[in-house]
Image: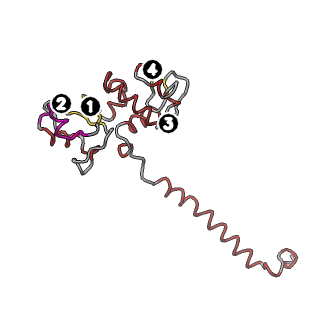
Amino acid sequence: MDVTATFPKAHGPRRWAAALLGVLLALTALPALDARADAAEPYDCAKTEWPWSCLAECESGNDWDENTGNSFYGGLQFQQSTWEEHGGLKYAPRADLATRAEQIKVAEEVLRTQGWEAWPVCSKRYGLKGRVHVVQRGDTLSSIARRFKVEGGAQALYKANRDVIGSHPDRLEEGATLVIPEPGKSSG
C-alpha cells in the first residue's frame, strides 16, 4: 500500500493514528461523564416552597402545566370544580393555564376549606395533616402559637416547622405554610 497516496505528507500516518486514538479515548470517556451526571444530587422538593413543591412532585411529576385529559389540571391536579370554587378563575380558566404561584394561592384556599385530604395520597406521603397557617405580614411564632393555642407555644411551633422556617425563627417568610401541631404532638 502506498501510504503517501492515502495520507498527505502534512498529515502522515502517525498524525492520523494519534487523531484516531484521541477520538477513541473521548468516546470511552463519555459513559464515565454520563455516570457522573446521573450521580448528581437528587431534587429535594422540600427546599423549594414546601409543601407545594413536594405535593406537585407527587401529584404531577412537578409539571405545573399538566393536562393529561383525566379531568385533573396543573401541578397540584385540581378538579375544575375545585379550581372554580376556590377562586381560580380570577387567574386562568383552568389550573394548568395558571402560573405556579397562582396555583399555590388557590391551593392555600383549598387547604383552608378541605384540609390536606384534598391531596389524600400525596399529603400522606409527606406526613401533611392537621391544621395549617399561611404566614401573613406581621405574624410571629408567638402570635401564631397564641392564636392556635399551641401547647408549648412558639418553641413547639418552631420545632414542628423547622424545615420551613430555617435557622431564623424571628424572620418568618410571608406566604410560608406552617403546620400547627396537634395537642400532645408538639415535636417535629
Q: What distance separates the C-alpha of mark 2 from that of mark 1? A: 10 Å
First along the sequence among labels 1 and 3: 3
To which quarter of the image does residue 67 belong?
Answer: top right
* Residue at the disc numbered 2: 148
Q: Quadrant of residue 26?
A: bottom right
Stretch in magenta? 138-151
Q: Is residue 62 left or right of residue 1?
A: left
Q: Height in image: 128 above or below 38?
A: above
The nearer-to-camera label among 3 and 2 is 2
Q: Is residue 78 above or below residue 176?
A: above
Q: Residue at x 26, y 31 (%)?
A: 132
Q: Is 19 displayed left or right of 154 in the figure? A: right
Residue at the image point whose x is 45% and y is 25% from the top: 88
Mark with earlier residue (3, 2) = 3
Question: Within the magenta stretch, is there residue 25?
Answer: no
**Residue wearing tag 1:** 132
Residue beneath label 4, please? 84
In the rendered image, which quarter contains the N terminus? bottom right
Instruction: Give whichever of 107, 137 is nearer the camera.
Output: 137
